[in-house]
Amino acid sequence: MPRRRSRRTERRVDARLGRTINEIFLGIPPAEARALFERVKAEAEAAQIIYEDDDGQSQVVPIMIRPRVIRSDQEAYFHRVCLDLNRAFERLPRLYLHDARVREMLPFTEREDRWLREVLTRLGDQPQPVIARLDANADFADDDWDGQFHFFETNSVGVGGMYYGPKVSEILINVVAPAMQRVAPGFVVKPQADMRHLLLEELTRHARQLRRPNLTTAFVQERGLVGGPNEFPFLVEYLETHGIRAVICDPRELEVRDGQLSCGALPIDVVYRDAEMAMFLQMEDEGADLTGLRHAFLENQVVSSLAGELDHKSTFEVLTTPEFARTFTMRQQRIFRHHVLWTRRIREFRTTDPDGQDIDLLPWLRRNKDRLVLKPNRSFGGYGIVVGPHVDLAQWDEALAAALAETSDDTGGVVAQRYVDVRVKDFPVLADDGKISLEEFYVVCGFLATQRGLGILGRASKRRVVNVGQRGGLTGVVVAV
């Protein structure tokens, strides 16, 4: 819902400073700038900002040397929009339980559906905590920054970046910002909201709702998993530095003793999970006893609750289908129109196109290749994405046929989503010969919004599919003072 701008809100940070953020960094003496690259890399390694490949090999995640800068009015706008979107997601559990059309849009296996129905029905109208990262296309330096702001998807189970996001910003503020400020004294920045603290506040709030003031927290994660980031040890450490007892607990270690959830001998008040329901069901198939975890879900002690499972990419189909508009507030409907990308799960049916016109979906998808991108509905990591404008018609037809064949499998199928160009930003890079130059990177942001603040995970990549798992890097987002 783009706003009418005042002259003040049109004024970009780089315009106020008289030069771009890159120009400020390039004004640092070359020898000092080269040393900054090495210091940032060393700080990232010391902070264990690493990503583990599927074969168990770890690597330090690259950090873009200069920060992305957001103004406080922009931060407030993104915060309001994300909060409204979160409130819209709170309506999904009831819709899923009572509307077959929504269940078709958000497909689960029969066993998943039974577990969902049992827990959601049991909890009824109780507030169900969901911690979500909303991934979006955002460019803080664009004159049309709010008009070109679009959400791609939501992630509400085991949200990544809660440690990486604030730590990367901290490194850039401590190491790089002082050198940039010597070049441009007006370059004054502060940290964004710390996602670790936002999580702590949400866990505290939920524990109080459950009348459990001790807040002993189990971070539930299967032991021995290989691949991806591993932020749980740092989240446990953060809670403990704030006086909160926290442990990492395998889901098989959760037990119920005299009606009290525990991990070993330690009573547990709240569980924060790192895995989707499908993984828990697989563990049960392999013989695991997850009675304790099921008890935690039924007693509303898990963050994110099972409501967090409703984060398929096809969730955006619910939000962009006219028949469901009245389910949401007028403000939420405006947000959907302006900031949520039209999305449909691929199947044979009639629906509406991005302009609201009635269509047969499959023929329309074939005719509109260059307006669309195909994505696996329930997978993550940036795999399996087909970008319409960048493949030929034969490849597109093949991808559509494969997507249609997947409508009945356990993956949730494939979605078609309106394509928007991923934003491109220049960042200084250090070549092997010691020269510093600017190179283009695709960038996206993940927003984590609570009532108390907005945390931002910035990512960058040479590929259009921006994901750390796809050899991407991290950008630190800081707030202009």
Image: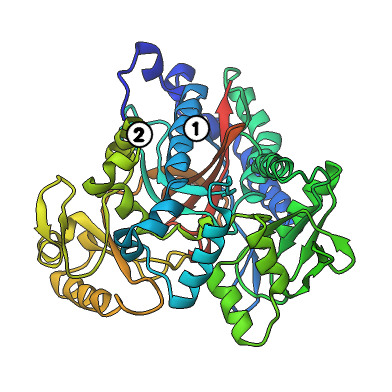
Question: Which residue is tagged 1?
Answer: 79
Q: Secondary structure at mark 1?
A: helix
The image quadrant where one finds the C terminus is top right
Indicate which disc, 2 or 1, sits on the residue closer to the N terminus.
1
Q: Which residue is at the front of the view, 136 or 45? A: 136
Mark 2: amino acid: Thr
Residue 235 position, x and y percent, is 73, 52
Looking at the image, which residue is at 69% across and 75% down?
Answer: 290
State the image quarter where residue 330 is shown.
top left
In the visual, does 361 lie left or right of 134? left
Q: Which residue is mark 2?
A: 329
Say which of 158 and 304 sits in front.
304
The structure residue drawn at horizontal position 53% and vertical position 73%, both measured from the top left corner, is: 278
Considering every residue shown, the one lying at the far top of the view is: 7
Q: How is the image coloured?
A: rainbow
Looking at the picture, does residue 179 appear above or below residue 98?
A: above
Question: Toward the viewer: 7 or 304?
Answer: 304
* Residue 159 seen in the current view: no
Percent x, y for residue 82? 46, 38
For the residues marked 2 and 1, what is the alpha-carbon distance in whole angstroms? 17 Å
Q: Amino acid at mark 1?
A: His
* Rendered position, 200 above or below 481: below
Q: Position of residue 387 (x, y in %)?
A: 27, 62
Question: Would you identify the image quadrant in which residue 355 lies?
Answer: top left
Q: Secondary structure at mark 2?
A: loop
Residue 339: image tag: none
Residue 460 visible in the shown view? yes
Quadrant (top left, top right, bottom left, bottom right) of the N terminus: top left
